[in-house]
Every structure is written in C-alpha cells, then in structure tokens.
Amino acid sequence: MTSARPFVDFTIFMGMHADEERVRVGCKNIFIEYARAGLRMSLDHIGMCDHIVWGNPYEVQAKYYPFMDMLHSTVPMERFYYPISALTPGNKERSGIPDSVSYALLCNAVRRMQGTLFTLLPVSLFSNITVLNPPGPVLEGVFSHGLEALYQNSRALAVPTEHLTGVEQCKESFHLL
C-alpha cells in the first residue's frame, strides 16, 4: 500500500474519463491505488475539471457529478490553495508550460512538499520535481464503496485524450486573460 499523498493535476482527474482506454484505465487506477492514503489537488485544478464538465450537455453532467461528489467524499482529497508566499520572486518554480501561472504554482507546491506530481503532460516539461505519468497498459481496477457503479454511469462523459496530453490543446481548452 502506498502511503505518500501525491499531487494530481486536472489531466489525471479528467483522464479517468479520457476517450482512450489506456489513459482512462491508468488515471482511474491512480485514484484506486491512493484511495486510502489520499491525493492532493489544488483548487484551481478542481476548477479546471469543472470547466471541462460544464462544457458538456446537462444530461452528461447529471451522470458525471454523482461520481465526482462520492469520489471527493470517500477518497481523502487534500484540496489546497496557494499561499501568498508562493507569488514572491524567490519562490518561482518554472514548468515548461508557457503562460501557466497555475502550473508554476503547482510545481512550487510539489517542490516545497517534496512530493510527486501525476500528470498526463510530458514529464520533460517539468524540472526540479518528481513527475510521473500513469503506468502503461494495466488491468482496470474497481472502485469500492458503491463508487464503481457511479463511475460506470459517469462514463457518459468522454474527454478527448488529446485535450489532456498536449500543452497547446490544454491551453486552448482554457481562455487566457
């Protein structure tokens, strides 16, 4: 059993609904593996997930949100915001994602906590932190506590994998101010 509480970004959370089976199963299995120890996810990345879901018809959202609500209630999710000190010049952490304050702040948090970040983005975009992609082809795990049935129903939402794995596609999914 893994005891450390790693970080996940929105690509891993939404990757549980990726239209590519290998990606979907890999992301789902991360949540199953850390169901007891828990995971860390920033509030802005939670908002990115909502942004993707809200772009779908209400009928799809109505099937998705019961799963998401139960997941957040049964898996210890350490949701966090960034302290003002993360904005000071001495605490800048760069990611290879241009124009992304969100990822710079997330990388800074991972570095400060000496943690690991799971993401679908290329590992080569990050430096000074431990970054992992989901494992390759594996057997699909099963959620417990009645969560699996909600998960299967939530699969009405299918996120194009390329919107989660490429920097430009991720940037296009969100509007820069």
Image (cartoon, rainbow, N blue to C red):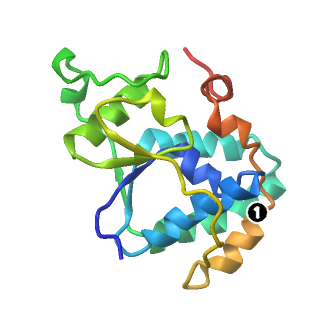
**Which residue ends up furthest to the front in the rendered image?**
137
Type of amino acid under label 1 = Arg
The image quadrant of residue 3 is bottom left
Going by the image, does 155 lie left or right of 142? Answer: right
Going by the image, does 65 lie left or right of 74? Answer: right
Q: Tell me the quarter of the image containing the N terminus.
A: bottom left
Mark 1, Cα crowd under 10 Å, few <14 / some 14-19 / many 20+, is: some
Name the one closer to the observer, 103 or 82. 103
Q: Secondary structure at mark 1?
A: loop
Q: Write down the residue under mark 1.
A: 155
Going by the image, does 140 lie left or right of 61? Answer: left
- Residue 154 in sight from this viewpoint: yes
Name the one closer to the observer, 74 or 118. 118
Name the one closer to the observer, 129 or 164. 129
Q: x, y (%) of residue 5?
A: 32, 60
Q: x, y (%) of residue 51?
A: 63, 39
- Who's the residue at 72% across and 36% down the image? 162
- Who's the residue at 49% across and 16% down the image? 98
The image quadrant of residue 120 is top right
Q: Is residue 15 above or below residue 161?
A: below
Q: x, y (%) of residue 127?
A: 34, 29
* Count of marks overlaid on the render: 1
